[in-house]
Amino acid sequence: MRLSKLTLVITLVGSGFASAGTMGPICSPGNVTLPCAQTAWGVHANALYLQSSYSGALGYSGFVSPISFSATDYVHNDPNWSWGFEIGASYYFNTGNDFSVDWFHLISPTTTNTANYIFGVPFAQRSYDTTMSIIKPNWDAVNIQLGQLVNVNVLKTLRFYGGAQYARIATSMTNTGTAFSFPTDYDIEDMQFSGFGPRLGLDMAYDLIPNFDAYAKVGTGVLVGSSKTNSTRGNLIDPNPFVIYANRTQVVPEVDLKLGLQYDFALNENHIIADAGYMWVNYFSPLARINYNFNNLETANYSLDGVYFGMKWVSSV
């Protein structure tokens, strides 16, 4: 009797029996592999066409109607589009490992906004004939990354990476107000953040056709550094302007995204890769502005977005 029961159990297990129901079709996992071992060098250069933007304390430069204060009366701080560049180098080794360094730089534009009232102009009780705000953003970022490439299947690849970023974000702002019976009042503000911190991310690529890929790249980091603010205000005939300086340690989260296409021209041991796409970068509260009404500092977010295009050259050793 015991032998019969044991035989029944073995038979049921071997046939895939389950009293709670069937499992359905058995999955066949795809191959996740590492690339073959290789040693290679690469360099790349991209032209950037980006627009800076602000939120928080630098979201608006002023308003056009000091009476209604409606949302449509506020003038946004929208700096002009500007060119920049990304240059970098990579070293490829072992089975899908790489070490890379990238430098991003924005060629600083200058943008002028006019309104009936500009935030930051001193002596707000005066009735100005004209008010004007000139803003100039600056951005530099250096990424140092160590990555690992894996092949999900024939068409898809993933690259995991970790590393660090150094970033310098600066904005200079000149606010002026001119009244008929007074010389021009002015407020010159210089805001800057410099920080360094860890960074990680994921690159995903999919082969649309041989040698032609669509990709998405996402990254994030946390920077720790110094946020400095300097404000000088007065008027053109005052020999002793009023100056305030502030400096504090700031923790700044960062996120970035790239969506693009690339085509690989394979030439024996060399690869020339054409690259183009859209990018977005955002830093949370890197800049601080002095609020004279409440004698405190108010923070502002800084972001960039736009298009890029360029070339990459990789040569096997």
Image: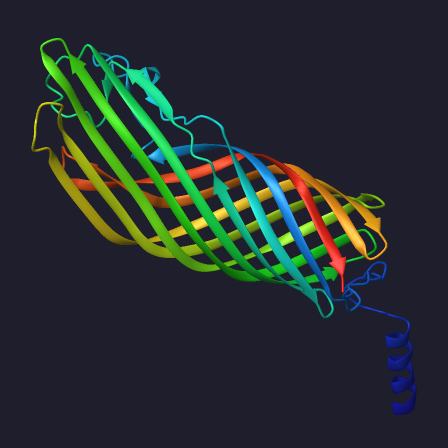
Q: Position of residue 157 (x, y in %)?
A: 74, 55
In the picture provided, is 180 more to the left or to the right than 4? left
At 62% from the left and 48% from the top, the residue drawn is 217
- Total marks shown come to 0
Q: Position of residue 168 (x, y in %)?
A: 39, 48
In the picture provided, is 236 more to the left or to the right than 37? left
At 82% from the left and 57% from the top, the residue drawn is 269
Q: Quadrant of the N terminus?
A: bottom right
Q: Position of residue 169 (x, y in %)?
A: 38, 44
Of 6 and 186, nearer the camera is: 186
Q: Position of residue 311 (x, y in %)?
A: 69, 43
Of 127 and 184, nearer the camera is: 184
Kindly give the residue lying farthest to the bottom in the view shown. 2
Query: Which corner quadrant of the image does residue 100 belong to?
Result: bottom right
Of 177 and 116, nearer the camera is: 177
At 60% from the left and 43% from the top, the residue drawn is 258
Where is 174 relative to 245, above or below? above
At 36% from the left and 57% from the top, the residue drawn is 224
Q: Quadrant of the C terminus?
A: bottom right
